[in-house]
Image (tube, rainbow, N blue to C red):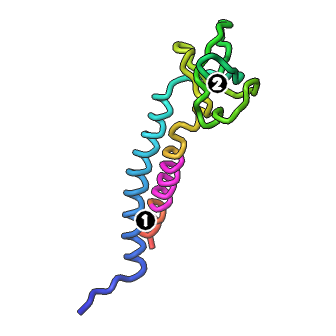
């Protein structure tokens, strides 16, 4: 004889599982995404220019103190740009020779977004589970 599970019990079990998975895994992913963003540190946005030098194509920019810095133009965003082209650049104040051409706000964004979606799913499933107790 097979046991049958009615719809109320099935939805209750499913909501418990989704609540646990959503809150635990979602919370972990969100915290990891925040940590990735925090570890990347503070970057300063500036305008830079692609230039030709004896070592090849480089990116040159001014820091806050007016000093000129450069790094190789080897990133995906700058690889095909001609000398004289403008590019948006981010650098660190403590180590201004370190730069990047992609937005640092995107660091960990996928983890944070996935974490928020799972947290939302966990909260909704928890509310459904609580509502099912009164039905």
Q: Residues within 10 Å of mark 1 (few under 14, many from 20)?
A: many
Task: Name which residue lies at 54% across and 42% down.
Answer: 109
Q: Is residue 64 visible?
A: yes
| Disc 2, SS | strand
Task: Name which residue lies at 59% across and 33% down.
Answer: 75
Which mark, residue 129?
1
Question: Is residue 124 within the magenta segment?
Answer: yes
Which is more toward the observer, 56 or 49?
56
Magenta span: 113-125
63 versus 13 height, above or below: above
Identity of the residue furthest to the bottom in this view: 1
**Quick one: label 2 or label 1, which is nearer the N terminus?**
2
Query: Residue 60: x and y, percent?
Result: 66, 18
Along the horizontal axis of the image, is 59 left or right of 27?
Answer: right
Residue with the mark numbered 2:
57
Query: Residue 21: x and y, percent?
Result: 39, 57
Identity of the residue furthest to the front in this view: 54
Q: CA distance from mark 2 to mark 1?
A: 60 Å
76 versus 61 height, above or below: below
Q: Which quadrant of the figure has residue 86?
A: top right
| Disc 1, SS | helix
Which is more toward the observer, 54 or 109?
54
Q: Which quadrant of the figure has residue 45?
A: top right
Identity of the residue furthest to the left in this view: 1
Q: Residues within 10 Å of mark 2 (few under 14, many from 20)?
A: many
Query: Residue 76: x and y, percent?
Result: 60, 37
- For the stretch drawn in magenta, the main secondary structure is helix
Q: Quadrant of the N terminus?
A: bottom left
């Amino acid at each position: 004889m097979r046991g049958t599970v009615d719809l109320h019990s099935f939805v209750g079990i499913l909501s418990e599982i989704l609540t646990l998975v959503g809150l635990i895994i979602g919370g972990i992913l969100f915290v990891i995404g925040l940590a990735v963003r925090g570890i990347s540190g503070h970057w300063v946005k500036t305008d830079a220019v692609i230039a030709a030098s004896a070592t090849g194509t480089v990116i040159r920019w001014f820091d806050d103190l007016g000093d000129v810095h450069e790094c190789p133009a080897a990133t995906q965003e700058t690889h095909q740009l001609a000398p004289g082209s403008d590019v948006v650049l981010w650098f660190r104040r403590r180590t201004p020779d370190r730069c990047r051409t992609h937005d640092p706000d995107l660091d960990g964004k996928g983890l944070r977004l996935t974490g928020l979606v799972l947290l939302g799913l966990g909260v909704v499933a928890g509310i459904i589970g609580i509502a099912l107790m009164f039905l």
